[in-house]
Amino acid sequence: MARQIRVSKSQHMTFFERLSRFGWPLFIIMALILTFSMIMLYSAGSSGCAGNMENCTFGAWRPYALSQLGKIAIALIVFFIAAFSDIKTWLRSSYALYAGALILVLLVTFVGHTGMGAQRWLNLGFFSIQPSELIKIGLVLALARYFAWMNSVELERHKNYWIPAAMVGVPFLLIMAQPDLGTAVSLAFIALGFFYIVGAQRKWFMILGILGILAAPALWFGGLHDYQRARITTFMDPTADLQGAGYQINQAKIAFGSGGIIGKGYLSGTQSQLSFLPEKQTDFIFTMMGEEFGFIGGFILIFLYSAMTAIIFWYAKTCRNRFGQLVCFGFCLNFFVYYFINIAMVLGLMPTVGVPLPLVSFGGSSLLALMFGLGLVQNAHINKDQQLSAGGA
């Protein structure tokens, strides 16, 4: 049933009133994690290494840290716009934002360019974006609006889940085809968590699990690429191909394990600085941190992630309007899935997939999507007492 948005008449908040409700704990933790990112990306840079390792200087602003600093500046602008704008703007434009992100994902199929073995990026001339990162936030917004005003009876009717299932299924299949297994799996986890939160019947999850098990052989032989199957077999037996499919994860384990409790020291990680560790600035930056700062450094970052997740969850619990509540819950799932999969992957606890470490890994698309999402969470918190309603059209 189509729904028409109605917003309760409430006093319009001034900028300073919004600022007084701003969630500073969340912002401070975000700033600390971004500081971690700059520290590690500076360490990942080097100069004077061309053809002579003896002249290498480890630690440099280029090529990663300086570039990421510019991306952070842009992402902060997006964050503050999302945080301090009217919540009705995001409510009314949620489907349009999802549709826009979906169109970009679809465009990748036809005009996207390939990087790191997958066709995931759109080249816009002066920069490239990865639409699969943007669709996660668009999906959260669209699902939040769709489910916001359903009562318990409506939430038990399976027909009311066909549209959101399509919202998830279409980008999932497109992203799988790029191929980007990591992002597709993340999208699936976010959707399942969202359906669980809104109150979908438990038996549907059981049926879906059974169907997934039955479909596994077909997915293995017909849905996965050779390198994806190799990553899974390497996860089952890490020593099977140490110089091939298992090289990356084994180097990651060596780097993280060699850091011990306190690490080898900043700019002193041999595995990362001597380039034994592939993708040290992106997906495997957590192991670089572990080598230089040890278990303590890794624990601090995980603590910050956990604190941020807890704060977002609390914002969701204290939000009085359902749309803002679901936006917070949805982004909380998104953020948790991001860092859980990345850290579990680089520690060898699950197969290797291409998922960046949130707010830390080098790159603009993930950072922009996450900062936009955090801005929406702040917006929901600032407007937590504003009542939003929808009536049947």
Image (cartoon, rainbow, N blue to C red):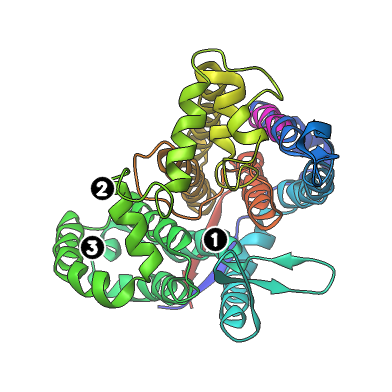
Relative side of 324 to 112, left or right: left
Disc 3: which residue: 156
Disc 1 is placed on an element classified as helix
Calculate the distance from the C-alpha at mark 2 to the C-alpha at mark 1: 37 Å
Above or below — where is 134 with respect to 318?
A: below
Instruction: Give the foreground label among 3 and 2.
Output: 2
Instruction: Give the foreground label among 2 and 1.
Output: 2
Identify which amino acid the numbered label 2 is placed on: Met
Residue 20 in which image quadrant: top right
Relative side of 166 to 310, left or right: left
Calculate the distance from the C-alpha at mark 3 to the C-alpha at mark 2: 39 Å
Q: Is residue 301 magenta?
A: no
Disc 2: which residue: 236
Residue stretch rendered in magenta on the structure: 26-37
Depth check: give the residue in front, 247 or 53: 53
Horizontal and vertical percent position of residue 360: 64, 39
Q: Is residue 29 magenta?
A: yes
